[in-house]
């Protein structure tokens, strides 16, 4: 379908896969098997890209159920996802444009297998802990790569988080769940999120939490915040912190 995925090696075992600037997936290569974290848009065979890097058996984990993180699953036999996002992933898999393309090319989404909070992925010399982080979606997860002190966050923690979606939790729920995650700052130094081009500092976790709290505790912000125009309509965008990061949100879901 075309060459879109640019691979960047970030460390001895970590590869960033940038899908034409639209989404980011990752490959972690252990001694016994390899892990693909999110499969991106699906226009290029991410399985073939990965096989160009490693010949080890491959496990696929989706951080959440949105189309720009799961469509490349069609190149694999199975993928893991938190069950709270099964329904969302099915909905996105049924989008007519994607379904028509799958029919055209004789492809289909493989079955999702459940992955839960507290599970451990052992790749051999590379160990990742599964952490449930509801917020952007109900079934969002992070993966903590112990040895390299890296937290893979999907879209659950990033510099421009979408919380205006129907499937997103309230800003208050996001803040509560981020607060529960603060212990990770003792275990990780860096973040790799679902639209990154490189590492973000772990301080992004605290900054997002403080930005959410600021929005919760500032009723006048709703009037002050600028409109955010996206394909789903017009909502609001709250700019926070020294780096001018953004929380996009829906009025009434604070």
Image: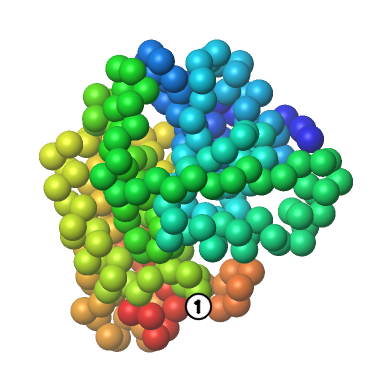
Q: Residue at x 39, y 85 (%)?
A: 252
The picture places residue 216, in percent across and down from the top left corner, at 25, 77
The answer to whether residue 61 is seen in the rendering is yes
- Helix, strand or loop under label 1: strand
Q: Nearer the viewer, residue 251 or 237?
A: 251
The picture places residue 220, in percent across and down from the top left corner, at 29, 86
Q: Residue at x 23, y 46 (%)?
A: 203
Work out whether 124 lies above or below 191.
Answer: above
Q: Residue at x 38, y 13 (%)?
A: 31
The answer to whether residue 22 is seen in the rendering is no
The picture places residue 194, in percent across and down from the top left corner, at 46, 45
Q: Is residue 180 left or right of residue 141?
A: left
Locate the C terminus by quadrant. bottom left
The picture places residue 50, in percent across and down from the top left corner, at 57, 23
Write down the quadrant of residue 246 in the picture.
bottom left
Would you call the spot at circle 1 few (<14 residues within 10 Å), some (14-19), or many (20 or more)? some
Question: Which residue position is annotated with label 1?
Answer: 235
Q: Is residue 97 left or right of residue 59?
A: right
């Amino acid at each position: 379908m075309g060459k879109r995925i640019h691979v960047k090696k970030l460390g001895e075992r970590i590869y960033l896969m940038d899908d034409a600037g639209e989404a980011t997936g990752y490959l972690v290569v252990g001694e016994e098997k390899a892990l693909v974290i999110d499969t991106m848009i699906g226009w290029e065979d991410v399985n073939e890209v990965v096989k160009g890097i490693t010949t080890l058996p491959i496990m696929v984990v989706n951080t959440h159920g949105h189309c720009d993180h799961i469509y490349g699953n069609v190149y694999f036999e199975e993928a893991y996802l938190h069950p709270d996002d099964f329904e969302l992933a099915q909905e996105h898999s049924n989008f007519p444009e994607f379904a028509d393309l799958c029919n055209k090319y004789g492809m289909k989404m493989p079955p999702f297998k459940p992955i839960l909070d507290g599970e451990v992925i052992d790749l051999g010399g590379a160990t990742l802990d599964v952490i449930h982080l509801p917020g952007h979606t109900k079934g969002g997860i992070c993966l903590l790569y112990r040895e390299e002190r890296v937290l893979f966050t999907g879209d659950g923690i990033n510099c421009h988080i979408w919380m205006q979606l129907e499937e997103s939790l309230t800003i208050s729920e996001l803040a509560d769940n981020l607060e529960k995650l603060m212990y990770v700052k003792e275990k990780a130094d860096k973040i790799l999120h679902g639209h990154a081009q490189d590492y973000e500092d772990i301080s992004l976790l605290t900054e997002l939490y403080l930005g959410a709290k600021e929005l919760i505790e500032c009723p006048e912000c709703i009037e002050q915040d600028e409109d955010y125009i996206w394909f789903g309509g017009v909502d609001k965008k709250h700019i926070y912190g020294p780096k001018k990061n953004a929380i996009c949100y829906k009025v009434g879901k604070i």
